[in-house]
Image: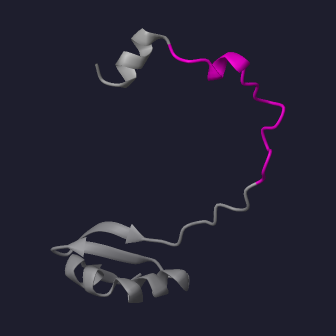
Amino acid sequence: MPMVNVHQAKTQLSRLLAQVEAGEEVLIARRGEPIARLVRCKSPGKRKPDVLKGRIIIPDSFFDPLPEDDLKLWEGE
């Protein structure tokens, strides 16, 4: 696992990201002491629309206007 200092990481970020995309891990060090590790993120996967359909019920009262006291709090008064 290669180790680079902070300055190198800032100036060569694109190259380091290419290494990470290729499956390599990169350590970033400050004064020779490792402080961070660049690793590839896991893909979040595909989102499924309507996954909660029928499981969450929003009452009609949700859309009612807020009472004056609550409005003043939201508006910072």
Residue 22 lies in quadrant: bottom right
User: Which image quarter is the N terminus in?
Assistant: bottom left
Front one among 40 and 75: 75
Q: Residue lying furthest left in this view?
A: 31
Measured as percent of width and height from the top left, residue 37 is found at: 38, 69
Front one among 71 and 49: 71
Residue at image x 35%, y 75%? 27
Residue at image x 26%, y 86%? 11
51 part of magenta stretch: yes
52 part of magenta stretch: yes
77 vs 51: above or below: above
27 vs 57: above or below: below
Taking 50 as reference, is 3 left or right? left
Main secondary structure type of the part rendered in magenta: loop
Residue at image x 35%, y 25%? 75
User: Which image quarter is the C terminus in?
Assistant: top left
- What's drawn in magenta, residue-wise? 48-66
Taking 72 as reference, is 17 left or right? right
Residue at image x 76%, y 25%? 57
Measured as percent of width and height from the top left, residue 53 is found at: 82, 37
Front one among 27 and 58: 58
Measured as percent of width and height from the top left, residue 25 is found at: 46, 77
16 vs 72: above or below: below
Snapshot colouring? one colour
Measured as percent of width and height from the top left, residue 12 is found at: 31, 87
